Image (cartoon, helix red, strand yellow):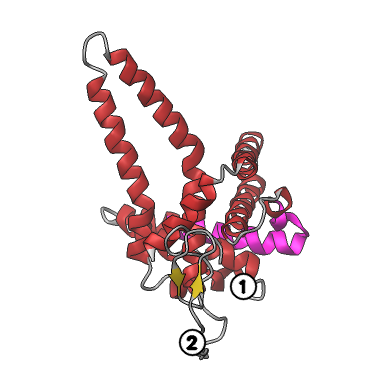
């Protein structure tokens, strides 16, 4: 599962999606501007930033499924007041719950981390399943992430561990006389690349897990006939008939 989601994510990034990168930066910039301008009116700025965060999640999910990155998707939570209230309300409720979990003495940070994985599907549910209330979106996210949380944690933390490891190695190499300056430059470039592309990479990963783990809105189990294997048009690998993306290269089937 992780391999397939990673393959799809790397396949998308390998196509150099500058438009996605631009919208990702735009989302971060809008959140920063709203936070700065609304520092004295958090009751307004916090819901807006929360809605922008959900809009970014929608952008990554759209691109993961083969659509073009669109700025209108980023702004989809602001379509009308009802949509905004529903999306922002659900996202703020999620953040409040995480904050309260974090406040628990000693074990709070660990519990909050675990809960953040349980609540990870909340923005997608709020925007794609609008009949579900803001508070129930968290409950459905908890249900949909069952059995996936450990894989989600490993998939998300792995790039960070690799980056930190390389950064430490480069920092140690920078202590070498004369040639150390070269490793300082490499470390700066690595940090810049990570800062620019990590949000896209992690956003696509989370979207991939939602696509893999989302469940029908009803408890009724759906029974489908096993379909014929599908051959990837890019790498030629045979995939199970119900797969949407190639498990080897990540191309859309």
Whether residue 74 sits left or right of residue 118 in the image: it is right
Residue 208 place in picture, x, y as percent: 49, 61
* Residue 180 belongs to the span the image colors magenta: no
Q: Earlier in the sequence, mark 1 or mark 2?
A: 1
Q: Quadrant of residue 21?
A: top right
Left or right, residue 180 beside residue 46: left
Residue at mark 2: 226
Residue 180, image x and y in percent? 27, 15
- Magenta range is 75-98
Image position of 221 with respect to 232: above or below: below
- Residue 104 visible, this angle: no
Reading the image, the residue beneath label 1 is 133
Position of residue 81 relative to residue 143, above or below, is above
Q: How far apart, in angstroms, are the residues tagged by discs 1 and 2? A: 34 Å
Identify which residue is drawn at 57% across, 61% down: 123
Residue 225: x %, y % from top left? 51, 90
Q: Secondary structure at mark 2?
A: loop
| SS for callout 1 | loop
Residues 122 and 214: in front is 214
Q: Residue at x 67, y 51 (%)?
A: 74
Give the mark toward the camera: 1 or 2. 2
**Residue at point 58%, 59% (across, down):** 61
Residue 110 numbered mark, or none: none
Label the magenta part by its dominant secondary structure. Answer: helix
Question: Is 91 included in the stretch rendered in magenta?
Answer: yes
Is any part of residue 198 visible from this angle?
yes
Q: Are marks 1 and 2 in contact (CB under 8 Å)?
A: no
Quarter of the view holding residue 27: top right
């Amino acid at each position: 599962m992780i391999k397939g989601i990673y393959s799809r994510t790397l396949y998308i990034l390998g196509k150099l999606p500058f438009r996605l990168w631009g919208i990702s930066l735009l989302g971060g910039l809008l959140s920063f501007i709203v936070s700065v301008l609304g520092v004295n009116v958090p009751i307004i700025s916090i819901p807006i930033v929360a809605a922008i965060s959900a809009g970014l999640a929608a952008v990554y999910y759209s691109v993961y499924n083969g659509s073009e990155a669109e700025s209108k998707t980023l702004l989809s939570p602001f379509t009308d007041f009802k949509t905004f209230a529903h999306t922002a309300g659900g996202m703020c409720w999620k953040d409040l719950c995480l904050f309260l979990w974090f406040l628990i003495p000693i074990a709070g940070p660990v519990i909050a981390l675990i809960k953040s994985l349980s609540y990870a599907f909340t923005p997608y549910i709020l925007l794609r399943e609008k009949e579900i209330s803001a508070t129930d979106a968290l409950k459905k996210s908890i249900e949909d992430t069952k059995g996936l949380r450990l894989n989600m944690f490993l998939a998300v933390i792995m790039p960070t561990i690799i980056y930190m490891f390389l950064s430490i190695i480069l920092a140690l190499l920078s202590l070498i006389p004369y040639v150390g300056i070269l490793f300082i430059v490499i470390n700066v470039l690595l940090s810049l690349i990570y800062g620019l592309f990590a949000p896209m990479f992690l956003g696509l990963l989370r979207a991939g897990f939602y696509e893999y783990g989302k469940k029908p809105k009803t408890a009724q189990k759906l029974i489908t006939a096993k379909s014929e294997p599908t051959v990837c048009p890019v790498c030629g690998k045979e995939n199970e008939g119900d797969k949407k993306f190639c498990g080897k290269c990540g191309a859309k089937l």
